[in-house]
Image (cartoon, rainbow, N blue to C red):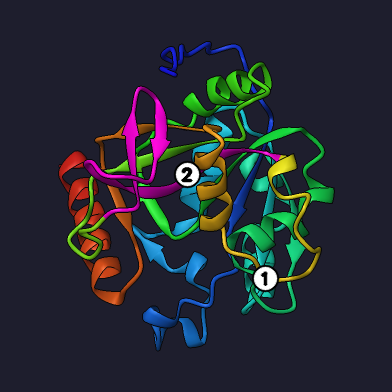
Amino acid sequence: MTMAPFRHDAGAFCGSAMILAAGRGERMRPLTDSVPKALLPVGGIPLIQWHVERLRAAGFRDLVVNHAHLGEQIERELGDGAQFAVSIRYSREASALETAGGIRFALDLLPLPVFPVVNADVFSDFDYRRLNDVVARLAATPWLDAHIVLVDNPEHHPGGDFTLSGGLVGDGPGERFTFAGIGVYRRSLFEGLVHGEPAKLAPLLRAAIARGALSGERFDGRWVDVGTPERLAALDAALRGEAARANF
């Protein structure tokens, strides 16, 4: 089945979104021995703050942030969100529960049947206003379980994750793309998981693919998986350079 294109309606705001910030950041060590990955700065701003401000600009004012390792630092940095004109609630994990497990653990803080989730450790100029359209589309399309954003494969992940055809995500032969860590999900996708138990997202997405229930889109703008000190430093230098040129 081919999906119709999404249309942006600037007045349609979902209001709630989740930011995943519980990862330990093993590849970022030793930086993450004393600072949670989500607070590492790029362009002079913590990674997670870029998401908070862009989600707010897109109309998402009620945010849920999960954390585990050094999570109290995230709470001190962001507080209740008032300084960013949003409301932030925290899902505190004793130890990281993986992506799907973390979302399942936070469901009580996410009362809506459909909601966006973004990874704190990616950087992108993807327009989060578009997520409002996706939320509305999933809410009106009960056979869809989720919608994910895909990007061209970076050098460190050349094999990609999924295929994309006619607006539906697949897992068979064909050109593959990388999951961008940006998605919109139906809460029922996670309700079968055991609360408080670690669970990965990929098996849920592949089960949705098997049902024909996972839509997606390709984003060809700037996207960085800020997963290593080298990629962090390169992105930071690029953003600082752009800011300097803009102020020249």
What residue is at 69 percent from the left and 65 percent from the top? 75
Mark 2 or mark 1, which is nearer to you?
1
Q: Is residue 181 magenta?
A: yes
Would you name the residue on which mark 2 appears? 182
Q: Is residue 164 magenta?
A: yes
What residue is at 66 percent from the left and 73 percent from the top? 71
Q: The N terminus is located in which quarter?
A: top left
Residue 173: where, in percent of width, then height?
Answer: 26, 44
State left or right for residue 182 relative to residue 16: left
Q: Nearer the viewer, residue 31 or 7?
A: 7
What residue is at 57 percent from the left and 24 percent from the top? 132
What residue is at 26 percent from the left and 43 percent from the top? 222
Q: Earlier in the sequence, mark 2 or mark 1?
A: 2
Q: Residues within 10 Å of mark 2 (few under 14, many from 20)?
A: many
Vertical relation: 177 (above or below) 145: below
State left or right for residue 123 relative to residue 194: left
Q: Nearer the viewer, residue 68 or 152?
A: 152
* Magenta-tinted stretch: 160-186
Given contact means CB atoms under 8 Å apart, are the residues at marks 2 and 1 in contact?
Answer: no
State left or right for residue 144 relative to residue 7: right
By secondary structure, the bulk of the magenta-drawn segment is best described as strand
The tag on residue 198 is: 1
Image quadrant assignment for residue 91: bottom right
Q: Residues within 10 Å of mark 1 (few under 14, many from 20)?
A: some
Residue 107: where, in percent of width, then height?
Answer: 78, 50
Residue 242: where, in percent of width, then height?
Answer: 20, 47
Residue 192: where, in percent of width, then height?
Answer: 77, 53
